[in-house]
């Protein structure tokens, strides 16, 4: 049997030790642990990597602590526009949605795009029409309301600025969520979900739903989920770049992930991190910010739930 393992993230950023109350830190770690265990349980019972990453991301989307699903940040028009993607490394099938509203679990809609449509990427009104045809329930705006997120938005709403879930502040962080997994068969998958950036407008879309930029999976190389300033991760084609370094330069998972996050993306001033896995169940979780909400668990017995460097 193959080593099976899973890694998750809840965003990277200026997460400095001592900044958060011990109570809040405990809440974050408990939320990460719950998502990790939910995904790992699926792998342990013989489920696929795709099922495991979807489940882990659903749990993170249901938490108000992260900028995805329930905890999504506010747009310039005081609404929520969410993006998500999922990719199966065995088949190279992928599904993605962007600019969707009212959907409790965007990652599940992305999986439906992958499995129930002929397409890869559906956006805006069309994606909502697709959800309607699949009988998705729509949540009202009160489901997504969070006082902290609303205050973040009130502070910048009349300006032209948009920010990455509290960027340039002492507690600057990106709250996008993601998961990568390797199942007992040695197949890998990746999923990513986000509310994007506070006060975003003009239908701004980041890297999270873009296959190859914020999310990628291929059994030949690795599965990746990113978090950080989306504009830079799109230009750096970050997730696919890690896969390319493995495929064409023969780098290990750890070396390739580190090269992209600590060198190549920094050269274009991109800040953030990623989680990576390969078909042997190896995991890498590099970030070039002060911290990244992250956790991993492997059938070899290793387990980690961390926030800081
Ligand atoms: N990458 C996301 C975006 O640009 C933000 C994040 O990672 O929090 O939409």
Image: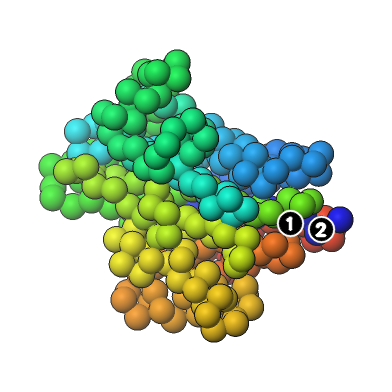
Query: What secondary structure is marked by label 2?
Result: loop
- Point out which mark residue 81 bears: none
Residue 205 in the figure: left or right of residue 43: left
Colouring scheme, one of rainbow, by chain, secondary structure, one colour: rainbow
The quarter of the picture where the C terminus appears is: bottom right
Q: Nearer the viewer, residue 237 or 92?
A: 92
Circle 1 — which element? loop
Percent position of residue 109, x then y? 46, 32
Residue that label 1 marks: 186
Q: In the rendering, at what x and y percent does residue 58 appear?
A: 56, 35
Q: CA distance from mark 2 to mark 1?
A: 6 Å
Vertical side of 10 occupied by 272: above or below: below
Are there few (<14), some (14-19), or many (20+) residues within 10 Å of tag 1? many
Residue tagged 2: 2
Badge 2 local density, few (<14 within 10 Å), some, or many (20+)?
some
Would residue 245 be found to the left or right of residue 42 on screen?
left
**Of the image marks 2 and 1, the number of the one nearer the N terminus:** 2
Indicate if the residue with disc 2 has its beta carbon within 8 Å of ligand 1: no
Q: Quadrant of residue 149?
A: top left
Q: Residue at x 40, y 18 (%)?
A: 133
Q: Is residue 115 visible?
A: yes
* Labels 2 & 1 near each other (Cβ < 8 A): yes
């Amino acid at each position: 049997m193959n080593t099976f393992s899973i890694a998750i993230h809840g965003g990277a950023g200026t997460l400095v030790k001592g900044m958060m109350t011990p109570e809040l830190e405990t809440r974050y770690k408990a939320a990460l642990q719950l998502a990790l265990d939910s995904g790992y349980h699926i792998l342990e019972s013989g489920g696929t990597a795709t099922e495991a990453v979807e489940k882990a991301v659903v749990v993170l989307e249901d938490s108000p602590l992260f900028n995805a699903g329930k905890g999504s940040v506010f747009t310039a028009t005081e609404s929520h526009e969410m993006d998500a993607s999922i990719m199966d490394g065995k088949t190279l099938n992928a599904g993605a949605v962007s600019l969707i509203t009212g959907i409790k679990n965007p990652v599940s809609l992305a999986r439906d795009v992958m499995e129930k449509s002929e397409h890869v990427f559906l956006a805006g009104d069309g994606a909502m029409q697709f959800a309607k045809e699949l009988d998705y329930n729509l949540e009202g705006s009160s489901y997504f309301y969070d006082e902290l997120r609303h205050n973040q938005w009130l502070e910048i709403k009349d300006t032209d600025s948009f920010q990455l879930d509290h960027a340039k502040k002492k507690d600057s962080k990106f709250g996008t969520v993601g998961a990568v997994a390797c199942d007992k068969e040695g197949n890998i998958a990746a999923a990513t979900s986000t509310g994007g950036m506070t006060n975003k407008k003009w239908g701004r879309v980041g890297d999270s739903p873009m296959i190859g930029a914020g999310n990628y999976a291929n059994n030949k190389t690795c599965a990746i989920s990113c978090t950080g300033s989306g504009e830079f991760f799109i230009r750096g084609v970050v997730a696919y770049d890690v896969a390319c370094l493995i495929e064409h330069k023969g780098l290990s998972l750890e070396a390739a992930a580190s090269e992209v996050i600590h060198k190549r993306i920094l050269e274009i001033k991109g800040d953030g991190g990623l989680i990576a896995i390969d078909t042997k169940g190896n995991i890498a979780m590099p970030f070039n910010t002060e911290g990244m909400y992250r956790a991993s668990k492997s059938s070899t017995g290793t387990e980690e739930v961390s926030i800081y460097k």
